[in-house]
Image: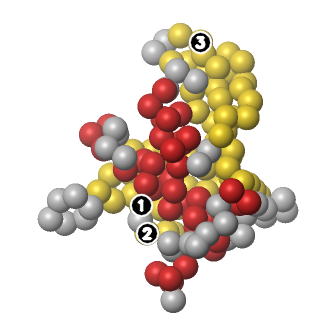
Amino acid sequence: MTAQLRGDNIRFTVYDLVGEEPAPVGVAALLPDPSVRTAEYVIMLAPESRGKGTGTAATRLVLDYGFHITNLRMIWLKVLAPNEAAVRAYEKAGFRAVSSLRQAGYWLGQVCDELIMDALAVDFPGPSVITPLLQ
């Protein structure tokens, strides 16, 4: 992953490292609120890259960056409740479901809930895998 600052947002390009050359397969972003040291997390992966662990690995790296480099205390996201693969990937990366917004989204043309998930810095004490790379 490579990080880019865009305004207050921190964007990452997600690469697939399986082939001979790294290939970009998506983007992830932290949308921080510096006044309370939290950020919303967003990730978008190409359909052909889903289900391979790429999203989980990228999410773990972004959490590491957010907690150990940016000094956030909490990172949160919203995900459509029926998107079970995404929910599992977020849970594997360290997010926990904390609430839901009832009937806030659509999944395959049907009204559905959106889950709110969060991850806390205290649950990621380190050591950071990113910090040594930046030295």
Looking at numbered disc 3 in the image, what kind of residue is underneath it?
Answer: Val
**Residue 118 on image: x %, y %:** 69, 44
State how far apart marks 2 and 1 are (Cα). Answer: 5 Å
Q: Is residue 3 visible?
A: yes
Q: Quadrant of residue 35?
A: bottom right
Circle nearer the N terminus (1, 3): 1
- How crowded is the residue under tag 3: few (<14 C-alpha within 10 Å), some, or many (20+)? few
Question: Who comes first in sequence, dot 2 or dot 3?
Answer: 2
Q: Name the residue under label 3.
A: 111
From the image, tell me which residue sits under label 2.
2
Identify the disc placed on residue 13.
Answer: 1
2 over 43 or under it: above or below: below
* Identity of the residue drawn at 55% across and 55% down: 29
Rounded to the nearest whole Å, what is the CA distance between mark 1 and mark 3?
31 Å
Mark 1 residue element: strand
CA gap, disc 2 and disc 3: 36 Å
The amino acid at mark 1 is Thr
Q: Is mark 2 on a helix, strand or loop?
A: strand
| Residue 29 vertical position relative to residue 8 in the rendered view, above or below | above
2 or 1: tag closer to the N-terminus: 2
In the picture, measured across the screen, residue 36 lies left or right of residue 20, that is right
| Residue visible at 71% across and 26% down in the picture | 100
Quadrant (top left/top right/bottom left/bottom right) for the N terminus: bottom left
Q: Residue at x 61, y 69 (%)?
A: 126
Image location of residue 39, percent across then percent down:
70, 54
Classify residue 76 as left or right of residue 132.
Answer: right
Residue type at mark 2: give it.
Thr
Quadrant of the image occupied by residue 68: bottom right
Spot occupied by residue 103 in the image (x, y as percentages of width and height): 67, 16
> To which quarter of the image does residue 123 belong?
bottom right
